[in-house]
Amino acid sequence: MTAEAGVVANAAEGSGSWTSSSGQTKLSIYPTPIPELILLDTPSALEKQIGMVRREITGYYTGVHSKAQGIIDRWISVEEKVETRIKSFRDPTEPLNPGLLYTGISALTTSVLTRSRGLPTRILLPPTALIGAFAYFLPGTASRVGAYGRELEDRYVPRFGEIRRTSIAHSGIAWERAKESAAVGRDSVNKGVKSIVESIEQGTGLNLKAMGWGQEVKKEAQSVVDVIQKDTKEVIESKSPSSDSEDSKRLV
C-alpha cells in the first residue's frame, strides 16, 4: 500500500519519475513536458555602430533630397511666373510671326552694315535698330513691354524714373520751342523775301512773281530754315545726356 501511495502522489504532482518504497527512481509512463525557451535579442557593438551610421546616412540623404526638391519647386515656380509674364506681353490683335521676323532681320542687317564702323557705332546701332523695329512692327506688344519696364523702374529705381521722365519732358519742351522758333523764322524769311521782291518790282518795274523768281527765292529760304531746324534738333539731342546728368546731380 505504501508503494502504491507513492506512485499515486508522483503521478498527481505530474513529475516525470517516481520513487518506490525501496528508494529506486524509475521513469514515469507519462511524457515529460518540453521546457519553454525565451530568446533575448541583444545586438552586438558592431551592429549598434552599423545601425547608427545607417541612420545618419539616411537622415543626411533625406535632408539633401528635401533641399533639392525645394530648389526645384522654386525654379519651377519662377519658370511659370516668367512664362505667364511673357504671355501677358503679347497683344492678341498682332501676329507675332512676321513682326518678330522683321525685327530680327532689321537688327541683323544693322549689325552687318556697321561691322566695319567704329566701336561705339557697332555697340549702339544694333540695339537701337532692334528697339525701333520692335516698336514699329509690334506697337501693341512694345507698349506692354514698355509699361512693364516702367513698372519695374518705379518699383526698384524710382529716382532713375524721375530723372528719365524729367529729361523727356525737358527735351519735349525744347523741341516745341525749336519748332516755334523755326516757324517764326520761316514767317520772317517769307516776309523778308516778299518785301525784297516787292521793292525790286517797284524799283525796276519787272514782274518777278510772274517770272517765278520769287518762288525760287522762297524755296531757297525754306531749305535754309529746314537745315537750321535739323541742326537745332541735333543739338538738342546731343545735349539731352548732359541734361540727364544735371538732373541727376540736382536730384541727388
Image (cartoon, rainbow, N blue to C red):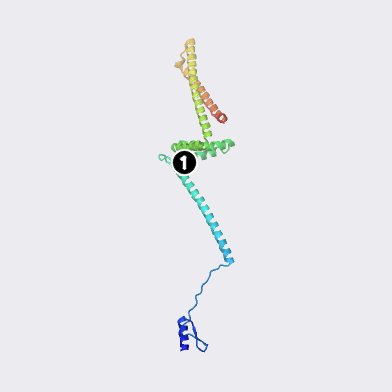
Quadrant of the image containing the C terminus: top right
On the image, the x and y values in percent for residue 129 come to 51, 36
Mark 1 surroundings: few (<14), some (14-19) or many (≥20) residues within 10 A: some
Q: Residue lying farthest left?
A: 93
Quadrant where the image shows the N terminus: bottom left
Q: Please tell me which residue is depicted at 44% across the width and 41% down the height of the picture.
A: 88
Q: Residue 60 in the image: x percent, y percent?
A: 55, 57
Give residue 249's position: percent from left, percent from top.
57, 30
Image height of 226 relative to 21, above or below: above
The vertical placement of 247 against 95, above or below, is: above
Q: Nearer the viewer, residue 212 or 156?
A: 156
Specify the amino acid type for callout 1.
Answer: Leu
Towards the viewer: 75 or 239: 75
Residue 54 vs 1, above or below: the answer is above
Q: Residue at x 58, y 35 (%)?
A: 120
Q: Is residue 229 visible?
A: yes
Vertical relation: 76 (above or below) 202: below
Residue 238 visible from this viewpoint: no
Q: How many marks?
A: 1
Residue 198, how many percent across, how many down? 47, 13
Residue sitting at x 50%, y 31%: 165
- Disc 1, SS: helix
Residue at image mark 1: 100
Residue lying at 54% horizontally and 27% vertically, measured from the top left: 236
